Image: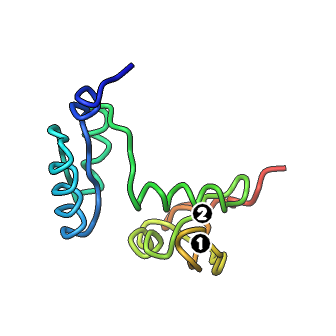
Amino acid sequence: MLSTSDIRQGRILIVDDKPANVLLLQGMLHRAGYVSLTSTMDPHAVSELHRNNRYDLWGDVVNTASRMESHGVAGRIQVTDATRRRLSERFLFEERGKIAVKGKGEMRTWFVKGRNGSAEFDAAPLN
């Protein structure tokens, strides 16, 4: 069985797009005795950090991605409105509309239809 000391030696990766959230979490975890904290606000850095350090991923972004999957439609890729805005130059989207998301309230969501500027693919559900 792991001791409290062993648990506090675990590597923790904090990922958020808001500096205040990162600082708050760093402070809370440091005061709780965790010693190996890494943080980033760069979404591109997460994959590399995770690959090199094998973190468990937690946080609002992970929770939102989980909700998109659990509230999704089989065979379709569903994204939030914020994700659609960031990817709108590279991909085509079909509006799904607002859905009730546990812990988030109503969220406007979209289905990915294909790449922008290339042959469009139909991401309709598979039968």
Of residues 63 and 89, the one nearer the viewer is: 63
Q: Is disc 2 surrounded by few (<14), some (14 to 19) or many (20+) residues within 10 Å?
A: many
Residue 49 placement: quadrant: top left
* The N terminus lies in quadrant: top left
Counting from the top left corner in percent of width and height, residue 30 is at 15, 49
Q: Is residue 114 above or below residue 75?
A: below
Of residues 112 and 121, the one nearer the viewer is: 112
**Residue hosting label 2:** 78
Residues at circles 2 and 1 in contact by the CB criterion of under 8 Å: yes
Counting from the top left corner in percent of width and height, residue 86 is at 38, 71
Counting from the top left corner in percent of width and height, residue 19 is at 19, 68
**Residue hosting label 1:** 110
Asked if residue 52 can be seen in this view, the reply is no
Q: Horizontally, is 86 left or right of 126 in the view?
A: left
Separation of residues labelled 2 and 1 (CA atoms)? 6 Å
Residue at x 64%, y 59% (from the top left corner): 121
Q: Horizontally, is 83 left or right of 74 in the view?
A: left
Residue at x 16%, y 57% (from the top left corner): 27
Q: Secondary structure at mark 2?
A: strand
Residue 125 placement: quadrant: bottom right
Lower sequence index among marks 2 and 1: 2
Q: Horizontally, is 115 left or right of 30 in the view?
A: right
Q: Secondary structure at mark 1?
A: strand
Amino acid type, callout 1:
Trp
Color theme of the render:
rainbow
Residue at x 21%, y 61% (from the top left corner): 22
Of residues 72 and 60, the one nearer the viewer is: 60
Amino acid type, callout 2:
Gln
Of residues 70 and 1, the one nearer the viewer is: 1
- Seen as rendered, the residue at the extreme right is 127
Asked if residue 29 can be seen in this view, the reply is yes
